[in-house]
């Protein structure tokens, strides 16, 4: 990145310790991290290295044992549950491995559930077009492939125009070809809306189109790769 962008999220000395009886597990160990406005960051690393724990803390789903997180001017570490709920609802779009669509609602209605309570949402049709599902708006989840269902979940996450898009193994339940379509939808959102995006994925191909790749090991960020130029989607060999 040539120009210096402000940080949307700042994490400082983030530590998370789980206590199970007499056993303590250090899931995160003094992690410092900035996510800059508009960038795309990929988290890579072995299972159990702390990726999900960090993403959940950044998204206000969990609190660190110690350390601080700030979103723009907001201190999330000392926030009330109510303030964290507001933060998640207004500013964060989440995508998980499982899509959690409501089976009795069409694709458009699943997206509309979110846009109805957002302050400046896009039209559900616009969100579905962005992920390439204009032709599938009136389909129910059972009439869609896994990859299409996950793209509905992407549309649902971004229709409220969140500042942050946090994705925890969004392609984990998909075959690689289908997974690529989902990653492409996420990349298009990042490109076209400028949504600050973090993705946990085992699909290393995405590392070339990211601004930065963070490698996790044992609850720490052990290495960071910065791509001086982001590769265009079409140039990526997956
Ligand atoms: N709710 C929990 N209770 C106890 N230990 C947990 C919990 N969640 C995660 N851990 C432990 O914290 C460590 C990091 O987990 P996680 O952040 O899920 O890693 P990753 O997403 O990289 O696979 C692992 O050792 C895991 O077993
Ligand atoms: Mg995980």
Image (cartoon, rainbow, N blue to C red):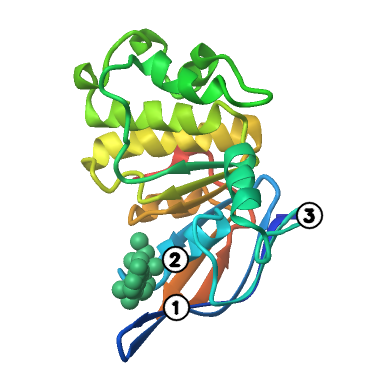
Q: Is residue 11 left or right of residue 116?
A: right
Quarter of the image for residue 201 reads bottom left
- Asked if the beta carbon under badge 1 is closer than 8 A to the nearest atom of ligand 1, the reply is yes
Give how far apart the Cα atoms at labels 3 and 1 are: 26 Å
Q: Secondary structure at mark 2?
A: helix
Q: Is residue 105 left or right of residue 155?
A: left
Task: Please tell me how crowded label 1 is: few (under 14), some (14-19), or many (20+) other residues with Cα within 10 Å.
Answer: many
* Residue at the image position 23 percent from the left and 41 percent from the top: 174
Give how far apart the Cα atoms at labels 2 and 3 are: 24 Å
Q: Earlier in the sequence, mark 2 or mark 3?
A: 3
* Residue 53, disc: 2
- Asked if the beta carbon under badge 2 is closer than 8 A to the nearest atom of ligand 1, the reply is yes
Image quarter where the C terminus lies is top left
- Name the residue tied to disc 1: 219
Where residue 207 appears, x then y in whole percent?
Answer: 46, 54
Give how far apart the Cα atoms at labels 2 and 1 are: 9 Å
Q: Is any atom of residue 196 visible in this view?
A: no
Task: Please tell me how crowded label 3 is: few (under 14), some (14-19), or many (20+) other residues with Cα within 10 Å.
Answer: few
Query: Does residue 166 lie above or below 103 as drawn?
Result: below
Whether label 2 touches label 1, CB < 8 Å: yes
* Residue at the image position 48 percent from the left and 18 percent from the top: 112
- Name the residue tied to disc 3: 6
């Amino acid at each position: 990145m040539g120009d210096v962008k402000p940080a949307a999220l700042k994490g400082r000395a983030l530590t998370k310790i789980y206590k199970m009886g007499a056993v303590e597990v250090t899931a995160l160990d003094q992690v410092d991290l900035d996510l800059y406005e508009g960038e795309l960051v990929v988290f890579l690393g072995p299972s159990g290295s702390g990726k999900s724990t960090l993403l959940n803390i950044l998204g206000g789903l969990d609190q660190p044992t110690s350390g601080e997180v700030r979103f723009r001017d907001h201190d999330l570490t000392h926030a009330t549950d109510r303030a964290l709920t507001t933060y998640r609802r207004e500013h964060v779009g989440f995508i998980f491995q499982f899509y959690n669509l409501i089976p009795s609602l069409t694709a458009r209605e699943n997206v509309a559930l979110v846009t109805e309570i957002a302050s400046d949402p896009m039209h559900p049709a616009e969100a579905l077009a962005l992920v390439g599902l204009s032709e599938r708006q009136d389909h129910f989840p059972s009439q869609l492939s896994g990859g299409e269902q996950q793209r509905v979940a992407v549309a649902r996450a971004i229709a409220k125009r969140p500042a942050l898009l946090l994705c925890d193994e969004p392609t984990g339940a998909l075959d690689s070809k289908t997974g690529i379509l989902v990653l492409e939808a996420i990349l298009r959102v990042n490109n076209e809306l400028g949504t600050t995006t973090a993705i946990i994925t085992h699909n290393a191909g995405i590392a070339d189109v990211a601004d930065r790749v963070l490698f996790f090991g044992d609850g720490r960020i052990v290495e960071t790769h910065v791509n001086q130029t982001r590769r265009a989607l079409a140039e990526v060999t997956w």
